[in-house]
Image (spheres, rainbow, N blue to C red):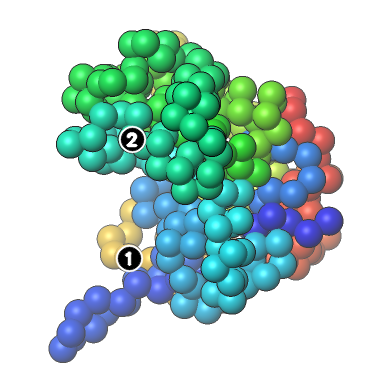
Amino acid sequence: MTALLELRNVTKVYTRGTFVRSSTVALENISLSTGGGAPTITALAGESGSGKTTLGLLLLGFLTPTSGQVLYEGKDLRKLSAQEWDTFRRDVQAIFQDPFAVYNPFYKVEHILEVPIHKFRLARSRAEARTLMEKALVGVGLRPEETLGRYAHQLSGGQLQRVTVARALLLRPRLIVADEPVSMVDASLRATILESLRKLNREFGISILYITHDLTTAYHISDSIVVLYQGSIVEIGGVDPVIRNPQHPYTQLLVASIPWPDPDQRWQRGQRAGVWREGPPRMAVGCKFTDRCPRAMPMCRESIPPFYQVEPHRAVACYLYQGSPVIAAEEITRVLSSQPAGR
């Protein structure tokens, strides 16, 4: 089955400067597909600067790759016709990190719902449009009478983010790219927004790519997880085994940094945090994590490790697993697609 969206050998390099130019490699040779088949929630996790947001923007068509292809149902985004772009924009929706940045303060909040209704001709009258907006708001746990008719500053960040989720729900997309959707929301409302996303997945059959640095929320909402480090995938698999028993040294350090509700439990117990090297990611000669890895070997500095399939639904880019079968980078998504949705 053709994936809805696919990154094929994608590299993204940011270049800045006029007279003295410098470059930053945000993503390097990434192959990944999402959507198509059973609706799932896939987390894309990693620390700040790992390339998560860049990957999301590439999938949304807001950025073009330096090399490689971004494919929509097997066709390069750069070659889509105007009609195909309209279909793409309906099939693939976004939820961004800052709910306040999405809204024009001069418009009432229903404006963000009216635009897609008008653009995609979802209603034949104002009354029908109003009914659609109200149903979408109720679907994400909001009361229309307390939401419509207000300006953005009159609602909380959590309410605004749920209106954004309602806007995505209006279009019944096949995939939502949610970039840190709860990071700027009060902790008391995070569970509500995450539950709204799960509802979109379970009741409406919408796949979700959940971009986050927070492994705790990734564990609670996702079916599978892709771990990025400095623009490269280091581990991919079902979220439960990856979080409970991480295999890549970087994933192990990420999980060890999670604060547990136990004052007697020390963070990173039994783990060495490694050494942080300043500077932007660069094209790799060997493993990018070598300087921080507590288990680095000489070969790690000499060549980039391939992906080893350590379990039926897990692949790790690390020489510690040399005895396991090697799989091509283009095939790692198969590891996830063979995994049943849900936990």
Task: Point out residue 114 in the picture as x, y percentages from the top left corner.
Answer: 40, 36
Of badges 2 and 1, nearer the viewer stands 2
Dot 1: what SS? Answer: loop
- The residue drawn where x is 36% and y is 37% is 112
Quarter of the image holding residue 243?
top right
Left/right of residue 241 with respect to residue 226 in the rendered view:
right
Q: Is residue 72 above or below residue 38?
A: below
Res 111 label: 2
Quarter of the image holding residue 4?
bottom right
Asked whether 303 or 241 is in front, the reply is 241
N-terminal of the pair, mark 2 or mark 1, is 2
Quadrant in which the C terminus is drawn: top right
Q: Is residue 308 above or below residue 143?
A: below
Badge 2 local density, few (<14 within 10 Å), some, or many (20+)? some
Task: Point out residue 270 in the picture as x, y percentages from the top left corner.
Answer: 50, 33
- The residue drawn where x is 47% and y is 24% is 127
Dot 2: what SS? Answer: helix
Q: How many marks?
A: 2
- The residue drawn where x is 62% and y is 32% is 222
Quarter of the image holding residue 106?
top left
* Residue that label 1 marks: 280
Quadrant in which the N terminus is drawn: bottom right
The kind of residue on which mark 1 rests is Pro
Left/right of residue 93 with respect to residue 181 in the rendered view:
right
Asked whether 338 or 318 is in front, the reply is 338
